[in-house]
Image (spheres, rainbow, N blue to C red):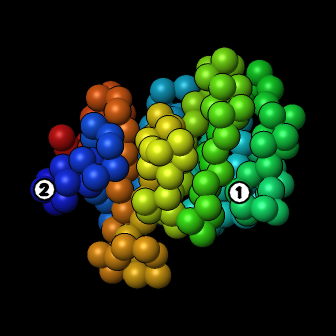
Amino acid sequence: VKQFEKEWSKWLGIKYSVFVNSGSSANLITMSILKILKGKGEVVVPSLTWVSDISSVLQNDLKPVFVDINPKNLCMSEQDVISRINKKTIAVFLSHIQGFNGLSSNILKFLKKRKIMLIEDVCESHGATFKNMKLGTFGKISNFSFYYAHHMSTIEGGMICTNDKKVLHLARMLRSHGMV
């Protein structure tokens, strides 16, 4: 597992990766980390995504705020995301659907200016890029799934990726019932 985490981080272009039993667990741990770092608040989520993106928000007593999709890439509508951001918003949980990129320079700039955390669900888009960088390298945290129907499979399994050492330690702790 340690070797896979190391090689995955290198391939993705990120410092740290934590392997978990599923993409759904990656989502749940990520939302737990978000709550630890930011407290309660709203998380902007897409209307087209996997159920664990939404259930992980609810299970952490955070409020999902749904936005519509852009029919050209099936990802979140940039205009809808921007219109739903308010003082209670602590993160945008963006899903890259079926290999499509859901990012734009405008949305990245907007989130950075507002200091709103971007979390990327890249479970269906391993290897897809934006501005010559792999998806999963733009957010504070990104999640991958290795479920058998995805681009790369370990039959089951998921990965939490970050460049933040604190997020790394929290992910490892939450993965292992508090043991690091």
Residue ID for mark 1:
75
Q: Determine the residue located farthest toward the front in the rendered image.
A: 132
Position of residue 90 measured from the top left corner of the image (x, y, whole percent) = 64, 30
Q: Residue 3 has which mark?
A: 2
Q: Residue at x 60, y 69 (%)?
A: 98
Position of residue 26 measured from the top left corner of the image (x, y, whole percent) = 42, 55
User: Is residue 147 at least partly visible in the picture?
Assistant: yes
Q: Residue at x 81, y 34 (%)?
A: 82
Q: Residue at x 68, y 19 (%)?
A: 114
* Nearest to the observer: residue 14 or residue 92: 14
For mark 2, give the secondary structure.
helix
- Amino acid type at circle 1 is Cys
Position of residue 108 measured from the top left corner of the image (x, y, whole percent) = 63, 32
Q: Residue 8 has which mark?
A: none
Q: Residues within 10 Å of mark 2 (few under 14, many from 20)?
A: few
Quarter of the view holding residue 109: top right
